[in-house]
Amino acid sequence: MSNINNNGVDMNNQTLTELSFSAVKEINDEVAATCSGGDGYINGPDPDVILFTNPGYNGGSLGVNAAGNDGVRYVGDNFNDQISSIQIVRGTWNLFRDPNYQGFLGQFGPGSYPILTGSYRDGGTNDNIASLLRVG
Ligand SMILES: [Ca+2]
Ligand SMILES: [Ca+2]
């Protein structure tokens, strides 16, 4: 019974109330992203960035073009929390954990990134990206 406290079951120092709030917030962000549509476009010609679900540029791939200094508010259910490698053709990009450019994970310039580090469990980039914004 050592992991029961006055606020309920303690899970990794988060109460159930906090965990529920976090889950609801993520769903709200995703609904907002779906309703707002993308700014840049995905799977179009001449991509600025190509995202892959597996390391080493394998698995499903998604080309993203910012159409200027812009981004993609949500990569879609087939890529959310699954991207493991990236090729950046042009531009400087900020990557985010959640839709709508929430939860900054890191900034990447032109180049090839065969293995993203960490995971969503430890706040890393691998299997965590939901949105990306071109900033330069
Ligand atoms: Ca993956
Ligand atoms: Ca995520």
Image (tube, rainbow, N blue to C red):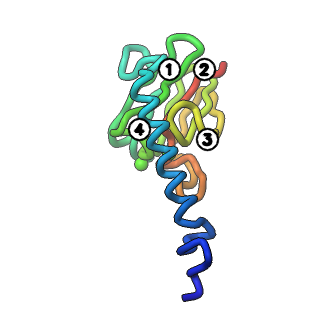
The residue that label 1 is drawn on is: 48
Asked if residue 22 can be seen in this view, the reply is yes
Horizontal arrangement in the rendering, residue 83 relative to residue 109 (left or right): left
The residue that label 4 is drawn on is: 52
Q: Amino acid at mark 1?
A: Asp
Q: Amino acid at mark 2?
A: Gly
Residue 91's disc is 2
Do callouts 1 and 3 mark residues in contact (Cβ within 8 Å)?
Answer: no
Q: CA distance from mark 1 to mark 3?
A: 22 Å
Residue at 35% over, 39% down: 77
The residue that label 3 is drawn on is: 103
Mark 3 sits near ligand 2, with its Cβ under 8 Å away: yes
Residue at 53% over, 31% down: 100
In the rendered image, the vertical position of residue 52 relative to residue 122, given as above or below: above
Q: Amino acid at mark 3?
A: Gly
Q: Residues within 10 Å of mark 3 (few under 14, many from 20)?
A: some
